[in-house]
Image (cartoon, rainbow, N blue to C red):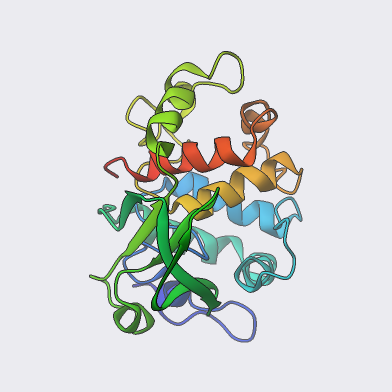
Amino acid sequence: MPPTVGKGRRPDVRACGYCHLPNGQGRPENASLAGLPAGYIEQQMADYRNGLRKSSEPRMGPPALMLTIGKAATEAEAKEAAAYFASIKPKTWIRVVEQKMVPKTRAAGGMLVVEGKEMEPIGSRIIETPEDLERTELRDSASGFIAYVPPGSIKKGQTLASTGGGGKTVRCAICHGADLRGIGNVPSIAGRSPSYVVRQMWDIKQGNRNGPWTQLMKEAVAKLTIDDMVALAAYAAAQKP
């Protein structure tokens, strides 16, 4: 790992690998960076630096921390980290399961964790939680996540992604590719965290992501409901990265 990823720089540039993990696969509260185009990562860091990207929920700690890091990191540091993460081949990290009743969870450390054996209706939510909490907290590079999604989500998401839903959105393949693994500097969304993907669509719809490349997504999310976003994210997450 280069210094920016492994050690960071005090006081404000925290080591990228601490949150996004050395393997770049990330966790639900942040982005999976493995295999993303270096140019895309560099542009996102520039957007943070220039005040063009923020979260719709300022109370959420990880995005607020990323905003601080993005403003403090130099172009050279961003370039170094981008080259490292772009060189990593993404792997299957999230198991997507359609389920009406799901384990009851609580928020802890920026993510949802299962407590006990009690179950509850999933409703219109994505419940993304560690397969093994202890290993996840130890930053185990071989321990991923399970994402529970509402029944029928994957099929609904596939229809929206492949047809545009009769004008409700833009076909994802136009920019992200037929396999959703990206084209050029357009990022792959296949196999990525569905809760993170929903947050990004929501941020774009709310006008909190305004970078130059984000403009292409504004039309795609303008008419989407939360249920639509959940379905699209579930479908994308279920695909091979």
Image: 232 above or below 146: above
User: Does the rendering let one see residue 85?
Assistant: yes
Measuring 70% from the left and 58% from the top, which residue is drawn there? 55
| Left-right relation of 82 to 87 | right
Quadrant containing the N terminus is bottom left
The correct choice, above or below, for 232 with respect to 56 in the image is: above
- In the drawing, does residue 184 fall left or right of residue 50? left
**Residue 34 coordinates in the image, percent (x, y):** 36, 56
In the rendered image, which quarter is residue 211 located in? top right
Q: Is residue 188 visible?
A: no
* Quadrant of the drawing holding the C terminus: top left
Residue drawn where x is 51% and y is 54% of the image: 195
Quadrant of the image occupied by residue 177: top left
| Total count of labels | 0
Determine whether, in the image, residue 89 is placed left or right of residue 133: left
Q: Where residue 205 appears, x then y in whole percent?
A: 71, 39
* Residue for point 32% across, 84% down: 134
**Residue 183, image x and y in percent?**
40, 31
Residue 232 pos. (x, y %): 48, 36
Q: Is residue 196 left or right of residue 216?
A: left
Q: Nearer the viewer, residue 83 or 146?
A: 146
